[in-house]
């Protein structure tokens, strides 16, 4: 456990200006800003506040409490549910007992104050019946380590004395709310309670005091662990050594696509790799296998991570990735069988159907932790949750015996009908959800428009480009709109074989594999044949022809290893079909791309890799090609300037329309998505109509 001090960030002057609900928001955001205080999405906060009833004008007590979903660190005012306290109290009169506690959730909307649309969470009764104005419920690793220890009751008493009580494990719900009330009434001077295998409750009648109390209690737990564990090796000491940093990524890059291919039968999964010090300490330790088998403890940990991880058979001292890969299918199948057996053992008559039986967390000795989920943020957060679990196991196993939740309890939470209802309410996934795309020339006009379209449809995108400054700028723009989880960049020259190989390994380690390759990086050049130097000819061939070959080859290798098919989209050119004056090198190289696509469509079909071509023409806006020499050369060929050229191309087109990068992106999306699942070896011209380029 970290002995670092938690910082009291409360600004009294700032808080003095705030209403009670605003102070609750302030306190919640401060608490959630430190992952040692609570994990992502874990825990909740509340305040009981007097408000005028909108109908009668009479003052009434209203509870503001974090609503269903969301995270206290980033919650905004509209994330809180508001409920009449007198109605919440009245619920106690109609409660039919433990076997019927789930029906109480359906009654919570009847207690809503002021038509607030935010749904109240199942934790609402845990706050309502604590007879104090402010309540914090947090999931600090240091306290969960106590809560998940075999002698957690005695430890709680030893560390906190009479200040903090202890309650045995009970699934959150109405009954636990009543237990908390009973505890408070019987122990009026207690400041909080540790819930076995779950977390911490603290309370006070003042918002600032409640915040301070929460920090003090967590600090006390951290300090206690620091003192108890000083000098002791964690998890029984190390039995494996970590590979070097690059070697760890290299191994992960080879394992992840193969794992992904075997666990994406229900939906394409996205991967996340973590080789932080805390993870390596655990995966290298003597007790890792035994502890991993016990499963995680805090309920929201294993809802994200599944009850236990899969330990990949890899010998860090004698790395043999090929042998590990060869054994993976059997390991993954064994995990699935084990999970199905757990489902069959624990299921009840009305349990929801079996969900995806594959592991979420993969531990690799000497290498790190790989997590997979339906999207990148969920994969990352699942990894963070397992790090929480590691912290808990480190603490608990150092001072006591770590205990996971009893299997049936774990199952009842995982397959809780209320949880199932929440899943059923989730919006339909976007068309490219879970897909990973690599776009070469991703910092350019057409590349960035294509990346944006894919991101908008739910894909993760690796932007690869030779221009580092533009790459950083493009990534910044896309991250601002789609978030940091789904955008990555790699500096790559498509003519450099080693750099291309590295870029695909980066995509594999950052997102878990590859579904869509857009080969787009390019240049344009113009010169009459007599003035075309060998160097100019070679440059076109290198970047366009050879570059497209190199990225396709690596894309094929990765997609084949993954075994999920894929889509390769070439951004070629109208000039690859139709000859154009004074551009022989460019036109010939573009023609070579188109023919390469046809050959690859033949080779890829048997493994479901589709290869198609989009041919743009005259996309002047947003394109860097149309800023340099090419612009001057084309202007001089057609004796006009940039505006004149745009007009000239528009008027030359059959449809008399200009073509924009977004138009090319639409075609690149069609070929990337399942809309074109039955097309390969095809060409779409996006050129506003040009009879020279009609395909036949
Ligand atoms: P752009 O210049 O805006 O983008 C091209 C990107 O490729 C740039 O970011 C550049 O840095 C990158 N790049 C160049 N050489 C590279 C290399 N060796 N390795 C890695 N990256 C490299 O141009 P655009 O208009 O977006 O062009 C994209 C593709 O579309 C090109 O293949 C181009 O030939 C083709 N195309 C464009 C037009 C048009 O009118 N804009 C017409 C037909 C075809």
Image: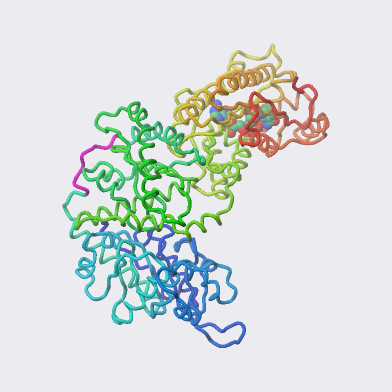
- Say if residue 628 shows up in the picture: no
Main secondary structure of the magenta stretch: loop
Q: Which residues are magenta?
A: 235-244
Q: Is residue 182 left or right of residue 647?
A: left
Q: Is residue 89 above or below residue 376?
A: below
Q: Is residue 60 left or right of residue 405?
A: right
Please name the residue shown 20% across and 39% down the image: 239
Position of the C terminus by quadrant: top right
Please name the residue shown 21% across and 56% down the image: 401
Q: Is residue 286 above or below residue 49?
A: above
Q: Name the one closer to the observer, 336 or 347.
A: 347
**Residue 236 in magenta?**
yes
Q: Is residue 407 left or right of residue 626?
A: left
Q: Determine the image quadrant of residue 610.
A: top right
**Residue 155 in magenta?**
no
Q: Quadrant of ligand 1?
A: top right
Q: Determine the image quadrant of residue 337.
A: top left
Q: Name the one closer to the observer, 480 or 83.
A: 83
Residue 683 percent coordinates (x, y): 69, 26
Q: Residue furthest top?
A: 530
Residue 448 percent coordinates (x, y): 60, 38
Residue 669 percent coordinates (x, y): 64, 37
């Amino acid at each position: 456990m970290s002995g670092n001090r938690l910082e009291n960030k409360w600004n009294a002057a700032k808080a003095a200006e705030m209403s009670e609900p605003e102070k609750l928001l302030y306190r919640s955001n401060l608490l959630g800003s430190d992952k040692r205080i609570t994990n992502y999405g874990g825990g909740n906060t509340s305040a009981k506040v007097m408000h005028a009833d909108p109908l009668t004008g009479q003052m009434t007590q209203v509870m503001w409490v974090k609503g269903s979903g969301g995270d206290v660190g980033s919650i905004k005012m509209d994330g809180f549910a508001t409920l009449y306290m007198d109605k919440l109290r009245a619920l106690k009169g109609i409660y039919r007992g433990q076997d019927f506690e789930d029906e109480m959730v359906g009654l919570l909307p009847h207690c809503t104050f002021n038509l607030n649309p935010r749904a109240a969470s199942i934790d609402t009764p845990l706050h309502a019946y604590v007879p104090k104005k402010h309540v914090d419920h947090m999931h600090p690793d240091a306290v969960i380590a106590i809560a998940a220890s075999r002698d957690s009751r005695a430890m709680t008493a030893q560390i906190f004395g009479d200040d903090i009580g202890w309650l045995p494990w009970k699934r959150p719900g109405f009954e636990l709310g009543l237990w908390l009330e009973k505890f408070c009434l019987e122990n009026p001077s207690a400041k909080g309670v540790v819930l076995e295998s779950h977390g911490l409750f603290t309370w006070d009648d003042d918002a600032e005091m409640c915040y301070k109390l929460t920090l003090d209690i967590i600090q006390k737990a951290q300090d206690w662990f620091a003192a108890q564990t000083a000098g002791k090796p964690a998890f029984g000491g190390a039995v494996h050594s970590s590979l070097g940093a690059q070697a760890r990524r290299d191994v992960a890059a080879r394992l992840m696509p193969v794992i992904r291919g075997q666990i994406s039968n229900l939906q394409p999964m996205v991967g996340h790799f973590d080789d932080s010090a805390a993870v390596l300490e655990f995966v290298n330790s003597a007790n890792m296998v035994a502890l991993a088998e016990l499963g995680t403890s805090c309920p929201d940990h294993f809802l994200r991570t599944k009850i236990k991880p899969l330990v990949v058979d890899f010998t860090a001292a004698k790395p043999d990735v090929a042998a590990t890969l060869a054994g993976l299918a059997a390991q993954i199948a064994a995990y699935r069988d084990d999970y199905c057996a757990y489902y069959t053992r624990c299921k009840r008559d009305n349990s929801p159907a079996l969900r995806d039986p594959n592991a979420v967390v993969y531990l690799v000795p000497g290498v790190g932790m790989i997590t997979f989920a339906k999207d990148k943020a969920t994969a990352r957060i699942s990894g963070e949750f397992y790090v929480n679990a590691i912290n808990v196991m480190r603490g608990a196993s150092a001072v006591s015996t770590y205990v996971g939740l009893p299997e049936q309890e774990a199952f009842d939470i995982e397959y809780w009908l209320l949880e199932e209802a929440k899943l059923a309410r989730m919006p339909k996934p976007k068309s490219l959800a879970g897909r990973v795309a690599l776009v070469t020339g991703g910092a350019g006009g057409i590349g960035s428009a294509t990346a944006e379209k894919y991101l908008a449809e739910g894909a993760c995108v690796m932007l690869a480009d030779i221009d580092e400054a533009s790459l950083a700028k493009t990534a910044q723009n896309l991250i601002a709109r789609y978030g940091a989880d789904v955008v990555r960049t790699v500096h790559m020259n498509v003519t450099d074989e080693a750099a291309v190989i590295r870029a695909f390994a980066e995509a594999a380690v950052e997102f878990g594999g590859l579904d869509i390759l857009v080969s787009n990086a390019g240049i344009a050049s113009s010169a009459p044949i007599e003035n075309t130097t060998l160097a100019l000819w070679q440059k076109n061939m290198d970047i366009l022809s050879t570059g497209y070959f190199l990225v396709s080859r690596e894309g094929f290798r990765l997609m084949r290893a993954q075994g999920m098919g894929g889509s390769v989209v070439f951004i070629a050119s109208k000039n690859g079909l139709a000859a154009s004056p004074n551009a022989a090198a460019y036109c010939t190289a573009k023609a070579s791309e188109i023919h390469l696509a046809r050959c690859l469509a033949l080779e890829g079909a048997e493994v479901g890799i589709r290869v198609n071509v989009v041919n743009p023409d005259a996309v002047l806006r947003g394109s860097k090609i149309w800023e340099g020499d090419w612009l001057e050369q084309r202007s001089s060929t057609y004796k006009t300037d940039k505006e004149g050229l745009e007009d000239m191309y528009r008027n030359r087109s059959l449809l008399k329309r200009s073509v924009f990068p977004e138009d090319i992106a639409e075609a690149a999306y069609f070929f990337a998505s399942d809309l074109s699942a039955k097309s390969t070896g095809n060409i779409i011209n996006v050129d506003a109509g040009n009879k020279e380029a009609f395909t036949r």
